[in-house]
Amino acid sequence: MKLLNTKSKGVLLGPLNKNNPITVQVLGICSALAVTAKLEPSLVMGISVIVIMALSNVIISLLRNTIPNRIRIIVQLVVIASLVTIVSEFLKAFAYDVSAQLSVYIGLIITNCILMGRLEAFAMSNRPWESLLDGVGNGIGYAWILVAVGFFRELLGSGSLLGIQIIPEALYEFGYVNNGLMMMPPMALILVACIIWVQRAKNKDLQEEQH
Amino acid sequence: MKFRSFTQNFLNLRFQIFHTMDTNKNSYTFIYAIIMVVVVALMLALVSGALKERQTTNVELDRKKQILSSINIDIKGQDIEALFDKYIPKALIITGKETREESGKAYDMTRPLEDGGIPVYIADIDGQTKYILSAYGAGLWGPIWGYVALNDDKNTVYGTYFAHASETPGLGAEIANKQFQDEFIGKKILNDENKFVSIAIVKPGQQAADRDYVDGISGGTITSKGVEDMIYKSIIAYESFLEQTSQQ
């Protein structure tokens, strides 16, 4: 028995590239700009989103036949907000240092459009297992963009990675200067745009037809 | 496999119930919302109640870490409680009229203590006395706080610790860097006439004429200013305590 059939595979792997929430659907941009100045918060934010996304997708998928149509968005928000609160409570109790670093970022997950988008577009009409795959896939799709952007911003902006100095002192003595613009939110947008550029150049089917 | 068919049946039954119900009816919507809210509230209350104790311990432990780091003690991988008891055997609580002694506690500085007192932690480092004052103020996006440790002359800075809730990473958030905090070491909070003037934080390259100064953070001007204000306002609250010793 194969672990994943073709459809499931597409659901899981699609968001990593051709259906990426950030670069193709252009969702969740605000948090991608806000948390990527350093690599570490990008990583933890990515992991938190994967977990919360997978769980909320499964929960909504289990409830999908019972949810009253007119308050479905509210129900989705309640599920996301409770999960985010629980995750942040657990972090405070068992990983206090990480939670102190992430104070604002964890709360930001509630307003992340990717979560709402996936719940509404996928979990409301698919079974729990596919929804789990979709949640994990989209979470990873979001996380890898964050990590890539965070990697370049911290390396070029602070000369370090995960707080460890990478660019040697000697280079600074030759006149190398950290790029202050990298620390500003606009640079995150430009880096995301570069990723989109490369991605579209490689995937012809993402390009619009020329007339 | 038997279990599986059981759950399958159960699920089918459940879906049948819901399919026969009209999920668009007003009454259904209201009842659904009410049940959902009650369940979620109960769940969150349970989680918060169950984790409360661990969280408070963590918060106090974290405060102790911060206090220890203001007197430049390497806390990596050490038992914080033991270190704290060793280096900071007591704390003075200064209220308007009197002072009383406490020990082994780290106080929440975001609000005054019950009797309106403010704590001074008295550290003992190899026989030398250091006074640790707490500071609390506002940065650009949210609160900032820290500890300033003074030598026993109650004038020279022995070490500092600053932290923030939500300053911009790479800019204002750099106040949490040891590099910035170490700039304060050796600076004096009194001027030549023994008047309290605090320590200025200036743009790198500039100077402050009337008092000791350190370089601020490029791109983090408002946070740097916030630190300066915080140090001034927080230390002035300790004035009676600081004067006390200069007379002795």
Image (cartoon, coloured by chain):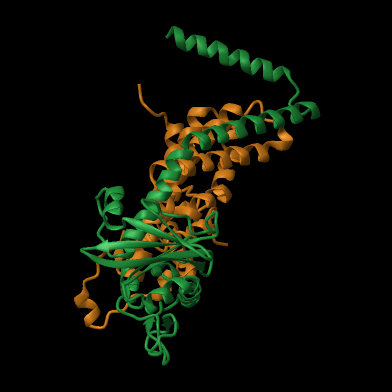
Chain colours: A orange, B green
Q: Position of residue B103 (x, y in %)?
A: 37, 52
Q: Residue at x 58, y 50 (%)?
A: A111
Q: Is residue B153 left or right of residue B40?
A: left
Image quadrant in which you'd find residue A90: top left
Q: Quadrant of residue B38?
A: top right
Which is nearer the eye, B179 or A53? Answer: B179
Seen at 73% across and 20% down, the residue is B21
Q: Is residue B41 visible?
A: yes
Estimate the x, y position of residue A10 in percent, counting from the top left. Answer: 45, 37
Give the residue at x 51% y 69%.
Answer: B139
Q: Nearer the viewer, residue B187 or A123?
A: B187
Lateral position of residue A132 relative to residue B83, left or right: right
Q: How many callouts does the rendering have?
A: 0
| Residue situated in front as seen by the camera: B43 or A124 | B43
In this rendering, is residue B65 above or below A55?
below
Q: Residue furthest top?
A: B2
Q: Quadrant of the N terminus of chain A?
A: top left
Q: Is residue B43 above or below residue A191?
A: above
| Residue in view at x 53 percent, y 64 percent | B142
Residue extending furthest toward the right: B26
Whether residue A43 is visible here, answered yes or no, is no
